[in-house]
Image (cartoon, rainbow, N blue to C red):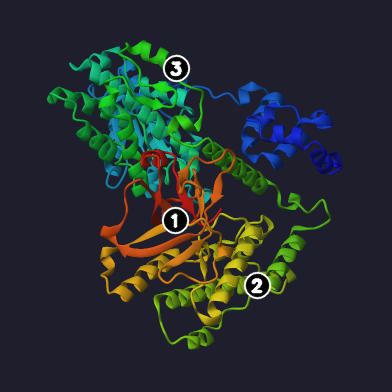
Amino acid sequence: MEESQGLDRDVEGSAKQWRKWAESECPEKEKLPQEWKKKSLIQKLIILRAVRPDRMTYALRNFVEEKLGAKYVERTRLDLVKAFEESSPATPVFFILSPGVDALKDLEILGKRLGFTTDSGKFHNVSLGQGQEMVAEMALEKASRGGHWVILQNVHLVAKWLGTLEKLLERFSQGSHRDYRVFMSAESAPTPNEHVIPPGLLENSIKITNEPPTGMLANLHAALDNFDQDTLEVCSKEQEFKSILFSLCYFHACVAGRLRFGPQGWSRSYPFNSGDLTVCANVLCNYLEANPNVPWEDLRYLFGEIMYGGHITDDWDRKLCRVYLEEFMNPSLVDDELMLAPGFAAPPNLDYSGYHQYIDEMLPPESPALYGLHPDAETEFLTVTSNTLFRALLEMQPRNALSGEELGQSTEDKVKNVLDDILEKLPEEFNMAEIMQKNPNRSPYVLVCFQECERMNILLREIRVSLQQLDLGLKGELMLCPDLEAQQSALSHDAVPESWSTLAYPSTYGLAQWFNDLLLRCRELDTWTQDLTLPAVVWLSGFFNPQSFLTAIMQTTARKHEWPLDKMCLTVDVTKKTKEDYGHPPREGAYLHGLLMEGARWDSQSGAIVDAHLKELRSAMPVIFAKAIPADRQETKHTYECPVYKTKTRGPNWVWTFRLKSKEKAAKWVLAGVALLLEA
């Protein structure tokens, strides 16, 4: 673009100034160096997008505020009273749920004020699920006659009944009692294809979405807002109750706030809400009254394994929840010695308004450190948010406006170029009959090699066949079916077609990077199949199934020493060398490379995990020596059980657990979400 000419020259010539701008905390608020500060707002956004994609959500927010006005970016507090005034027997209120938001609680408070409560029989709460449809139908009929309120929670769980519900609401909208009201709640669908709510139901309703508070300050105040001065005085052990309740509020703010950091915050997403917190407060009061001393162990178990833990489905997330409670709930809390976060001590004994004031005055500025995470955790989360936003913008554009049109190249031409390029570079399938003849010895390592080649062949075949069909479709020699159209769309957006990714390994790469990675994997397998001897250093990331290779290390050692496999485990030593330093494999076990650490880094000098450098989201690990030993010989002191995942999306991509040496206590790395990844 003409406006950007000379940018490369200026950056090279004034590297210091540009580096300072690029590494500043909020580059979107800083002026660009040299003459570039005179550029228009949109041109500055383009430069920022290239250099600091993580700041784009903030920059676009500023852009909208400047061009359209502040009202488009300010978050307004939900006004349920206003929505209620606009509702009628024919106009229900529909809550679109967000994680951590409890629509029922706000509604119950309003109902109490207007005389519609469960006790008075004028408030019907139906939580939908299997077999609850009849209950809901009876409640609607009763309410329409008597002028009651009905809330139907989680209507998205009964997709087949929603047509009936739509007809019932239409029937009762005429001639019902004037006080009759219907409220519904549902989670938003993750993708348009999974959307189940009938359009008529949505169109006739007043729709309300209440985003959860963001940031520790808002979350902590919101957690405390669930209680009042009377709550603080309800327990006879007032000092202990108040200390633990505040710590519980901070814990709640942490688990809710971590969700925005993506997989590094929680491996999976959970619907923690204020109901979990209020139930824990009741349990806390009962347990303190019933025991002469504070039952720390019991409380941590009830909060971490049952109340909050009831939502959690991932072992690593359960461990994270447990560690939080061990850090926030122990005897030092009552002795006024506990730090809830760096620079934020547990408060002294205060009254209710005093706690709110303490938060305002003493809480450090918002940063990932308040949750126990490394400052870089925010950079990763913001980059993903920004990429998602731009992907959505690109997909919303009309087909003919896609990039390439301006250069006189149609989408079809672009797809044809990509297609030809891939077909030209795509390797031939592995000749399995020939490879199997090379080595009659079927050792565990050789079997892993065979399995990997077979999986790769299936993927290569699918890529070749589907591209050949798409090529015929583009030439007009074959009818373009929906599958081929989806493939064409993916190729034009630099995305991996679904028919390939379902047969491949988990990956977050765009098409170009994904295909280069595929070629590297084929080359690695090709080298291994030459004589089927174990490579000097194994690229663990290059496997479809890395677990099978790690298991093969254990099987080989077990056979050699005649040890029982179920009494063995893998142990890892991180070397100080790189892959090039090794010419042959070890006598036992294997050398592994290709792993990256997220959330911290490995320090070769001290041979332990240490804090990551700023702006270094993931750092490469040296070669790791993995070998199998009897489980009872494993060294567990001063180690951190580090999960290994295939990609940064974590969750179901778990591979193994490596015990790595650590001079700090393991809790620090658990809270920081430290993990090893097989893909950058």
Amino acid residing under circle 1? Asn
Please name the residue shown 33% across and 38% down the image: 323
Please name the residue shown 37% across and 36% down the image: 272
Give the mark nearest the N terminus, 3 or 2: 3
Give the mark nearest the N terminus, 2 or 1: 2
Q: Nearer the viewer, residue 474 or 554?
A: 554
Q: Nearer the viewer, residue 154 or 615?
A: 615
Q: Is residue 243 left or right of residue 548?
A: left
User: At numbered mark 2, what does the secondary structure look like: helix, strand or loop?
Assistant: loop
User: At numbered mark 3, what does the secondary structure look like: helix, strand or loop?
Assistant: helix
Give the mark nearest the N terminus, 3 or 1: 3
Q: Is residue 389 left or right of residue 212?
A: right
Report, in whole angstroms, how far the alpha carbon at label 2 lies from the one at label 1. 27 Å
Q: Which residue is mark 3?
A: 362
Tell me where residue 284 appears, x and y as whole percent. Answer: 22, 26
Q: Which residue is mark 2?
A: 426
Tell me where residue 265 appears, x and y as whole percent. Answer: 45, 40
User: Does residue 214 lie above or below 112 as drawn?
Assistant: below
Report, in whole angstroms, how far the alpha carbon at label 3 lies from the one at label 1. 40 Å
Q: Is residue 405 left or right of residue 242?
A: right
Q: Which residue is mark 1?
A: 653
Q: Is residue 152 left or right of residue 76?
A: left
Amino acid residing under circle 2? Leu
Q: Nearer the viewer, residue 169 or 632?
A: 632
Packing grade of label 3 (10 A; few <14, some 14-19, many >=20) is few
Tell me where residue 555 appears, x and y as whole percent. Answer: 34, 71
